[in-house]
Image (cartoon, rainbow, N blue to C red):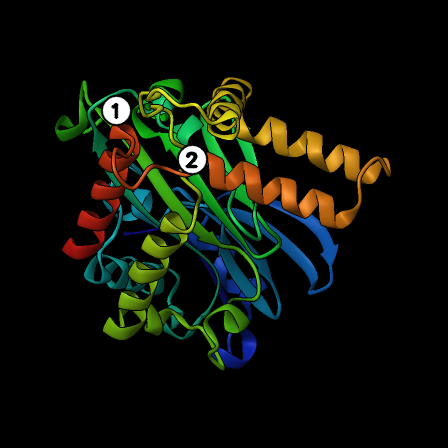
Amino acid sequence: MYDNIDLALTKEQSPGISFLATIPQYLTSVSNQGNNQFGEYITGYLDSLKVSISENRIKVYDSSLCKYLLGDNFKTLTKGDTKRAIDKISDTLHLPFHLSNITRIDFANNLIMQFPEEIYYPYLGEAQYYKRLPQPNGLYYNNQLRQLVFYGKEYEQKVKRQPIPELYKNRHVLRYEIRFKKQLRQQFKKPEITAGLLTDQVFYNELVIRWKNEYLAIQKINSKLINMKPTGSKKELAENLALYSILELGQSQVLNKVKEWQLSGDISKKQAYDLRTFIKDLTKTSNEKGNDLINELNKKVKEAARCY
């Protein structure tokens, strides 16, 4: 389930070698970039991998380790695949990249769905500690440390004019990724995150659990209203009509309006909190009926986590 992995090898981890003098010969499209906080640096490519070199550090970044090893970034890497990819980098550059520090981990899986991917996005609501950001081909949840990403993988391949593996041709492939982008040691509560840790079974299991639980923590929106039963209650009728309106307008739009009222001073912080709670409770998936689309997505994510 690994995809993009950013690796940084320091001078202390490979003493006695002049990075600037020896490593560029193994790269293509080498260009002199100037200076940064690590001193003079240059960039180039190791096959499909971006590489930045200074005298004190070599960084492999913003590239798919899966594409480097397997030839495309449609699939993801197992623990064994990841070790082989890092060994390949080490052998090609003649450096011990198994000792390198990990500065970013993208953990992902492809989910083959019954319907086109974009049908599922409106039913993924708000997530605590994240900002929900709809995209032309998907849905992002961002915070300062992580990113949750949902997008159509087959669509992406077609746009980039890249081949689609036979297994996924003419299928609805929803890619769900969690991207750990900053402060990995703090996020995983470990003194260091090195390449060797990526193949550790306990750490890998932790990533699978995080991948699943971050998805489950997203609020799911009920798109299929339970058929309204006859009621003499004005309160029940008002709540059903309010639910229709929220689903029609979009939960995020209504929550943003409440935030606007609070910021403009029209309502208090307590009133805004009560309204947000009311809106979120109203649009939660019914425990009795559920939402067929969300139930399918929940099942796919849980099955993928069990398999790995």
Residue nearer the viewer, 169 or 187: 187
- Horizontally, is 165 left or right of 26 in the view? left
Q: Position of residue 2 (x, y in %)?
A: 32, 53
Indicate the amino acid at tag 1: Pro
Residue at image point 67% right, 47% down? 273
Q: Which residue is mark 1?
A: 163
User: Height in image: 88 above or below 119?
Assistant: below
Q: How many marks?
A: 2
| Residue at image location 31% in from the left, 42% down from the top | 67
Q: Which residue is mark 2?
A: 124
- Asked where in the image residue 294 lies, by quadrant, the reply is top left
Residue 33: x and y in percent read 68, 47
The spot of residue 107 in percent (x, y) is 36, 52
- Mark 2 or mark 1: name the one nearer the start of the chain: 2
Q: Is residue 3 left or right of residue 299?
A: right
Query: Of residues 27 and 116, which is closer to you in this image?
Result: 116
Give the alpha-carbon distance from disc 2 to disc 1, as whole Å.
29 Å
Name the kind of residue labelled 2 in the image: Leu
Check the image and report above or below for 216 versus 254: below
